[in-house]
Structure formats: structure tokens, C-alpha cells
Image: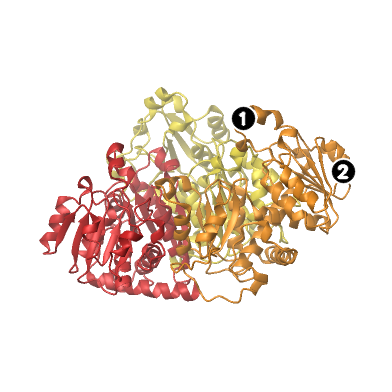
Chain colours: A red, B yellow, C orange
Amino acid sequence: MSQNGTPKPHALRTAQPSDNMNNGFFGQDIISVRQFSPEKLTYIFGVADEMETLVRRFGSADMLSGKVLANLFYEPSTRTASSFMAAMVRLGGRVIPINEVHYSSVSKGESLPDTIRTLECYADIIVLRHPEVGAAQIAADYAAKPIINAGDGIGEHPTQALLDLYTIRKELGRLDGLKVAMVGDLKYGRTVHSLTRLLSRYNTEFYFVSPPILRLPEDMVAEVKARGLKAVEVEDVHEVISDVDVLYVTRVQKERFSDLALYDQVKDYYTVDPELMKMAKPKMALMHPLPRVGEISYAVDQDPRAAYFRQMENGMFIRMALLAAVLGKA
Amino acid sequence: MSQNGTPKPHALRTAQPSDNMNNGFFGQDIISVRQFSPEKLTYIFGVADEMETLVRRFGSADMLSGKVLANLFYEPSTRTASSFMAAMVRLGGRVIPINEVHYSSVSKGESLPDTIRTLECYADIIVLRHPEVGAAQIAADYAAKPIINAGDGIGEHPTQALLDLYTIRKELGRLDGLKVAMVGDLKYGRTVHSLTRLLSRYNTEFYFVSPPILRLPEDMVAEVKARGLKAVEVEDVHEVISDVDVLYVTRVQKERFSDLALYDQVKDYYTVDPELMKMAKPKMALMHPLPRVGEISYAVDQDPRAAYFRQMENGMFIRMALLAAVLGKA
Amino acid sequence: MSQNGTPKPHALRTAQPSDNMNNGFFGQDIISVRQFSPEKLTYIFGVADEMETLVRRFGSADMLSGKVLANLFYEPSTRTASSFMAAMVRLGGRVIPINEVHYSSVSKGESLPDTIRTLECYADIIVLRHPEVGAAQIAADYAAKPIINAGDGIGEHPTQALLDLYTIRKELGRLDGLKVAMVGDLKYGRTVHSLTRLLSRYNTEFYFVSPPILRLPEDMVAEVKARGLKAVEVEDVHEVISDVDVLYVTRVQKERFSDLALYDQVKDYYTVDPELMKMAKPKMALMHPLPRVGEISYAVDQDPRAAYFRQMENGMFIRMALLAAVLGKA
């Protein structure tokens, strides 16, 4: 949906129901977690619950039969790409996977807006992963069809943040009044930033656990505090492990470092193992956006508090809910 | 369909209706624009019109359900590959995308005929993009199943030529008696060659606008003149802009130049901008096969005469029409 | 299906019929030819026959509609990947192709078990091609959903062996008492090893034809002889050509050689041409797993005994049978 009001007469457009349809999701772009009011979150989480029931009972539905999704990934991301593909086909839709953008017309010098305007000639919705911050908004500015941001560099990755929040709600039964520790790379960790923003709307107590060079950006700490929320920065996860309801661990992303010596210093800073989990509450959620490279030992996988694979599954349900809502079928 | 009459007993073949079915398209290969008589063009354009109606009303159909297309791209081409994929799935068919041929059995030394004969064991129709002239005909010689040429080097790209012609007809309401300027790389531009050939059957006046080193090959100019058509070669687009019904602009393709100094000389030779469009007729079509890299400025996109994104959409309708016709369901 | 008994509570699991369903295939992993008793082979071959009928009559079915296959290829293999994709979509299922694993989370350091446990959150079954021996079993140990081994290095490639055996049965009408020559790279040739193992259960006479440096591993020769079967090793295919019912030719795989000088010595050791075929029995089967790079001349393709393209087609029918059986729908 164009953000600048310019009509895009070239794209296929069928008659559109009222914008109030599907709680306002119909035809909308999904660019940022900032778009999600508590009411919208509640709505999407409810639809995601229904999607889980649907998948467990029937495997799939034909709700989006006749609809085509262009899955446009400028960066590789097996996990996110597969999750969107599965979400679309489980709703009966079709997917055009476009993964090799480095070989394609882009390498012939085409701009993102032209690529997007071409793909919307073929597809009903576009999922975009792009290495540059702001790419999803640019795409949405030019596209008449809805765009879903599947990650734009160190910018936003709203579906990840939604699935994280949805997982917390499912694991702990509530969102208000939780103590949440974010652990690992808080400086570059996009998922941490988006989830922190979403959790700031609830009465959350934050613990930000990181090595000094990977601390949460100051403006984000200030943003949290400005909402009157507790935000404690510590270096040692042992200081907080016994208090928290959620331990959200992230990988230190090698690809974000230009100085690999710095990376080597911090890459093995934290390892969640059974010893550490002994200190944790009996009811808590250990989360990780995956992939992990050592932050959580395999020995923890059988722990019932290890929620990271359930988190993956929830990602598919959330994406099914968003696709259905945006395409007017939820 | 074998061109040399050799039966291919290894391939799946179901009972075939008369060859007259679908105006002779059933089971045929689509290799060259030379195959298209005016009657066949009229037939395919009519089916494409119906496909547009179908997509705008229902999104998709199940006309080709049960059919499988192998989308075999030896060269990257996001646009063409996506367009064929969308066309197939909007007709209810399934697609096996094969994009990474450089990694595959080809890199183990397999010949094109063997790859084709393998894929026709799995699929009902094969779309082939290949860097070498003549590859599509070789594939058709060996295959029992229909082959659609999606571009073979500087050879042919018949579906592009068809969608270009279809777009001209839709934009201007007729094909006869038009003044058409081809602009840019006329030497290597495959789309220009094929479209020129198709337009030569109508009473077209041609203007070939290019830098001296990228002029239309002499034999093509001769071919046009031999049909008694006007063919004017100029260097400056200003000389023709106010006269033409169609301005067909092409990108200078870097990948066709072995001497990059020559490329740099000509790459920015033409830029269509709002100033130039002021001189154009109020009813005309500005076309481009895309991707563009500067030949048409973004400021022109909102001009109602800018037809290039509609051209993309028409590509899907034309490919839907061809797939349906060749598979006997149009 | 977990081999170590550990329940995997994170994965989607619907109510499961008795394990006797589908002759014991339901929910099982397909890792090795060793899993296939003669009864199971007979069952799968019978289902494959039905799949051929289905494809020839209707093109496809909707038996697996609602099911999703993750086609996870860590190594390129156009042929095997396409065959599984075609098999799944001809049964009405959907495919998530994951071919570019070198770009994906694996390159971020993710382990195979984590990748598998992620994909089983989205898919109902996983087909895995991996360069390392044992990878498929590792995947099966961690996955709650069924894994099909599509080749693990020089380990196993069970669906290839099944399609080879199925082809022999179709071409010659029986499996017992055949004289079978294996020709080419018998040292590294995974397909030769698996097929030899399967044929050892029938009263087969083996001829192993190879250059000295590519002989069948001694333990495999011993395994065959231990079953009381004839196993003759020769260098010259002329010694056996007139006796055999099956001539199974393989490519010398460049990628298995670290010393390319050795490769050059043996790569052109054998060429099956019309001259050689004149010495063969009038009823016999010339087979090759393809791709070929010169071991069989193109002039042989029209020979009715040339079974290699029929072999390809049989691969799709066998894979359809396995997918249907494992997913409980055969």
C-alpha cells in the first residue's frame, strides 16, 4: 500500500472491502512493530491460535487458494524464508521463491522499486528480506500490493518480534508484569530491539545482559526508562537468572563485526547450560531466535523450559495469521 | 515435440487430441516468433484477454491442475522466471524451479539433451532459458514434451516479443499502420529483433535510433525494407519523438560487451525524461522490456503513456495463454 | 522418527494409526536399503506400479493435499531434487525447496540437528541430501517427523537403489537368477554399492567390471560371496557383455578424486557404443543412474535395451510410492 498516496494504476487490484475488515489489516503493509496496537496484537494472536488448531487437525486449508506470494530474499535466511513458504502453502496459496537475487536483474543494476513493481504484477503479496535498513518501507512506498518486512538489515524484523511476543504469552500465560532478560548481542541484535519495543507496552522489568561492547544502544535504554519501566544493565547472567520469567538469548552475529578480533573476544561470552538452568525458576521460558552457535548447549534441549523450537513453530502460525489477515481472509 | 520425427518412447505421453485443437498449439513447442501466423497471434491475444479477466475476477483457475512445469533457467532472469511461475500457478499447475544449473548435473558435465530428457520424465512442459543461440531448438529436437523458449542467448525470446506486441495492441487499439521507434542497443537487443520481425507483418513504419556502434544488423534492416516497409536509421531520438506511436527503449546490456570501454561510451546515450515526453504525442506508448538502468527516468513513471509496468503484467497473461494452449486447455 | 526414543514434544504430530499401516512404512524414516525386506520391496513396487497408472491417466492426485515436504539439499542434485519435487506435487502435496544451504543459516554455523528440528516445525516430511556419510541417520535421530535419505556422501542413496531394482524388475520381468554386470567406478559408486546389496538377496550372478584402481571394496566382494553368490571381477567389459541380463554403467565421479591425474587415467575407460551392444543379448537392460559424461554413446539411446530414461521415470514413481506410504496414504 503506497505510503505517499500515489496511486499505482499498473498493478492488479480487485475490489476492496472496508479498511476495517480484519481489524484494519486488510491490504496493509507490515513494516514495523510500531504498527501494532495492543488490540491488533490480541487480534493476530487469536488468529494464530486458530491457525495452530487448523494445522494440527487438518494440516492445511484452502483459505488463500488462488493467491500468490512472492518470497523475495536479497539475503539468505533459510528459516524465515521456509517459514513464510510453509505458512502460505498451508493456507492453500502459492509461492514464487526468489532467492538468488545476486544473480538476477538486480545484478543488471535494477532498483528495488522496479523489482517490486515488477513482482506485484505477478503476485498478490510480497515478503521482502533486504540487507539495508528502510528497504521494506521503500518497497511499500512504491508497491500497490501489500509488503511484509521479513527483516531489513539492522532495522526491523516485525514478524520475528510478533512470534517472540506470542511465544512468551503462550509459555507464561500472560504478558503483563514479566521479568525479561535479554542476553548476548544487544547492540546489533535486531530481534532484541523489536521485542524490547513491544514488551515496553506491558509492565515489563528488563534486564539487559551483555559484554560492555555489545550493550543496548543508549537511546533504547532511555526509551524504556521514559516509559517508567525498570531497565537494569548487567554483564553477568548469573546475577539475574534466578529472577527472570524469560531468558531471551541471542547469537553474537559475526557478520555485523568489521573487526573480527572484537568478535572473537565476545563470541563465547555466554553459554546457557544445565548448571545455569538449575538456578532458573521452575516456570520460565528459555528463548532464542536461532540459529544458535553455542549460546545454549544441546544438553538443555530436553528441559521443558527450553522454548526455542516451539518458538519456531509459533513463527509459522503468526505468519499464517498475518498472511490471512492482510489478504482479507482471516 | 520432436522436430526430427524420432519418437521418444521413454517420456510420459497421454492420448492426444487432434493437432487442430487450440488452433494448432496443442503439444507444440514455442521456439520462435516465426511460428506465429497472424491467426495464431489473434488467437493467443484473445486467450490472454480472457486470462486477464480470470485473474482480475478470481485470482486463479484450476485449468492446469495436475500439470507440472519444469522452469529450467541456465541463466538468471528473475523477471521471466517469476512470470512463468506465476502464470503456471495461477492456472492451478505446479512448478519445479531449476535455477541453479551451474551447481547441478550440468557441472558434472551433462549435456542439454540429457537434462531435458530427464526433466520430461517428471514434468509435462519445460520452459528453458539458456545462454546459447539455438539451445531451445536442440531441446525441442530431443524432447517429446513441449518446450517453451524463454530466451536463448542473443537468439530468440518469443514470449517477450508476443507480450510486446500484445501490449502495443492494448495500448493503441490496433497493430496496423503504426510508427514505431526502437531505441538503444539495436545490435545485441534480442527483444528488438523479435519485435521488429513481428511488427514487419503489419504496415509498420520503423525508426531505428541508436549510437553508430549499436545499429540494427544490416540484414535485419534489409529484411524490413524487403517487405516494402519504411526503415529510418537515426542517432538522435529528438528527431523522431514527436512522430511515433510507440517508443520502445532498451537497455544497453553490459554483459554483451567484451570491451568495457565501448560500453562506457554508449551506456548513457539516451535518457527518456519528462522533457522528452513533452514532445511526444498525447496518445502513444512508452515501452521497455526492463530492467532499466537509466534509459527512462523515474519521473516518467506517472505519465499515463508509460506502459512498461502494464507490459510486465501482460507478460503473465500471454504466458498463461501459451501454457494453456500448449497443454490443450485453452 | 527418533531412533533413540527421545520424544520430540516441539514438533507437530497428529494422531497416528497403527504402525502396521502401509506395511509398516507409516511415519518411518527411509535411511538405508537395509530396511527393505523382500515383502517391503514387493509392497513399494506394487504402489509404484499404481503411481505410474495414476500419472499416465490423470497426471496427478490429491492424496497428499495438505502435506508439506521440505526438500533440503546441502549438495546440488538437480535430478534427485526435481524427482522428489515432482513426486510430491503429483500427489497434491507442497514442496519447500531449500537448495542454497551454503548461503543460509548453516553458513552462520548452525548444526544439522537444529536445521532439521526447525524444518520439521514447518513441514510434514524432510528429504535430505548431505555430503557426509551418516547425516541422514543423525537427522532421523533428532527429528520427530520422517526423514528420507536422498544421498549422504559415499554412504547410502536408498531411493536410487530402489528405483534401480524396480527398473530391473520391469525391464526383465523378474529379479531372481539374473546375471548383472556393474561397470565403471565401483570403488566410490554409491549406487553400485546399494544396488549390489539389494540384488544380493536374489539369486544374482555378479560381474564387477572396473579399472584396477576403482575395484569394488573388498568387504563388499566378501559380503556377496558370503551369501554364496558368484562374484567375478574383470577389467574388460567385452568378457561379460554377451552373458549379462543387466549392464549397469556408472560415471567416474571427478568430485571423488583428490588426485586429478588418477581421474584422467580412468575417466574414459569404458564406452558403451552400438558395436558393443551388438554383442549383448537381445533381451537385456542397459542402465545408468545418469548423468553420463561419455560412458554410453548417444548412438545407443534409440536401442530398445537402453533403459536409462525409463529408469529416471521409474524414480518418480518409486518416490511417489515412498512419500505416500510414509505419510500414511498409500
Q: Which mark is residue C96?
A: none
Q: Secondary structure at mark 1?
A: loop
Taking depth in this image into account, of B39 and B54 the one nearest to the observer is: B54
- Pointer 1 residue: C259
**x then y, percent, for residue B168:** 45, 48
Identity of the residue drawn at 45% across and 24% down: B213
| Number of other residues with Cα within 10 Å of mark 2, as a class: few under 14, some 14 to 19, many 20 or more | many
Q: Amino acid at mark 2?
A: Ala
Q: Earlier in the sequence, mark 2 or mark 1?
A: 1
Taking depth in this image into account, of A32 and A248 the one nearest to the observer is: A248
Q: Amino acid at mark 1?
A: Asp
**x then y, percent, for residue B208:** 45, 33
* Chain bearing mark 1: C
Residue A34 showing in the rendered view: no
Asked whether, in this view, residue C122 is left or right of residue A171, the answer is right
| Number of other residues with Cα within 10 Å of mark 1, as a class: few under 14, some 14 to 19, many 20 or more | few
Count all numbered tags in the image, as a single digit. 2
Asked whether, in this view, residue A226 is left or right of residue A330, the answer is left
Q: Nearer the viewer, mark 2 or mark 1?
A: 1
Residue C123 drawn above or below residue B253: below
**x then y, percent, for residue A297:** 38, 56
Q: Quadrant of residue A87?
A: bottom left
Screen quadrant of the C terminus of chain B = bottom right
Q: Secondary structure at mark 2?
A: loop
**x then y, percent, for residue C238:** 85, 36
Residue B137 drawn above or below residue A198: above
Residue B103 showing in the rendered view: yes
- Pointer 2 residue: C280
Asked whether, in this view, residue A52 is left or right of residue B142, the answer is left
* Chain bearing mark 2: C
